[in-house]
Amino acid sequence: MIRTLTIIAALLPGVALAQTATPHPTDMKGAHTMEMHGQMMNMGTSHTGMAMPTQPGQGAFATIQEIVDMLAADPKTDWSKVNMDALRQHLIDMNFVTLDAQVKNEPIADGMRFVVTGAGPVRDSIQRMVLAHAATMIGVGGWKYEAAKTDDGAKLTVHVPVGDQAKLRGLGFIGVLTLGMHHQAHHMMIARGENPHG
């Protein structure tokens, strides 16, 4: 028993030191406190040291949150022009076209024609997305795009060089829509109240 108490007594100073080695953010003062707290939140931990979730739980919400943060951090942001509702509508269009549109592939001599259809709001989203994408990407990488509205959606015809035929077939309609990495820039333009296609 005496030996056990001696060992505990010897360890107590080390325990006390470990407890005081990392001060709690609320024990610090001023900007340093906020800086430390921000660093911990960025690393996915709260000021209590507990792990914190980093995902907001929904992709469209995460996109909007990211852009709101960027706009808030930019002192040049003109909040009188910001339109997050327009960005939300665009993300709804993307969701409808990605998940609900019906696509029929029609091979042509130098490419592919995609007949994209849907009903109601899906049709409307198809028409907005397809025509905007064709206008943005025409001529990029030597690919030519033709888009036209139909009664139940739109047709997108893509003409490519011979060497890109297999790539086009592999990409399909939704892969073609992702080309160009312009969506992110367009999202910011829409949020700022600008017309990305005009």
Image (tube, rainbow, N blue to C red):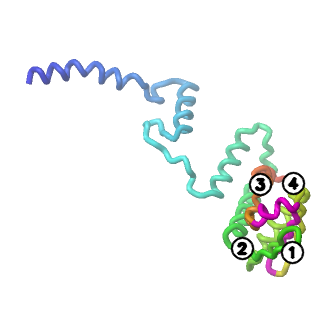
Q: Residue at x 83, y 70 (%)?
A: 112
Q: Amino acid at mark 4?
A: Gly
Crowdedness of circle 1 by 10 Å Cα count: few (<14), some, many (20+)? some
Q: Is residue 118 magenta?
A: no
**Quadrant position of residue 170:** bottom right
Residue position marked by numbered label 4 in the rendering: 141
Q: Secondary structure at mark 1?
A: strand
Contact between marks 2 and 4 (CB within 8 A): the answer is no
Q: Amino acid at mark 2?
A: Ala
Q: Secondary structure at mark 2?
A: loop
Single out the mark in the foreground, 4 or 3.
Answer: 4
Q: Cα distance, mark 1 to mark 2?
A: 14 Å
Is residue 82 visible in the rendered image? The answer is: no
Q: Cα distance, mark 1 to mark 4?
A: 24 Å
Residue position marked by numbered label 1 in the rendering: 149
Residue 51 in the image: x percent, y percent? 45, 42
Q: Amino acid at mark 3?
A: His
Crowdedness of circle 2 by 10 Å Cα count: few (<14), some, many (20+)? some
Single out the mark in the foreground, 2 or 4.
Answer: 4
Residue 167 in the image: x percent, y percent? 77, 61
- Magenta-colored span: 152-169
Crowdedness of circle 4 by 10 Å Cα count: few (<14), some, many (20+)? few
Is residue 29 visible in the rendered image? The answer is: yes
Mark before the other along the chain sequence, 1 or 2: 2
Left or right: where 83 falls relative to 20: right
Left or right: where 168 falls relative to 51: right
Q: Amino acid at mark 1?
A: Lys
Q: Which mark is residue 101?
A: 2
Mark before the other along the chain sequence, 1 or 3: 1
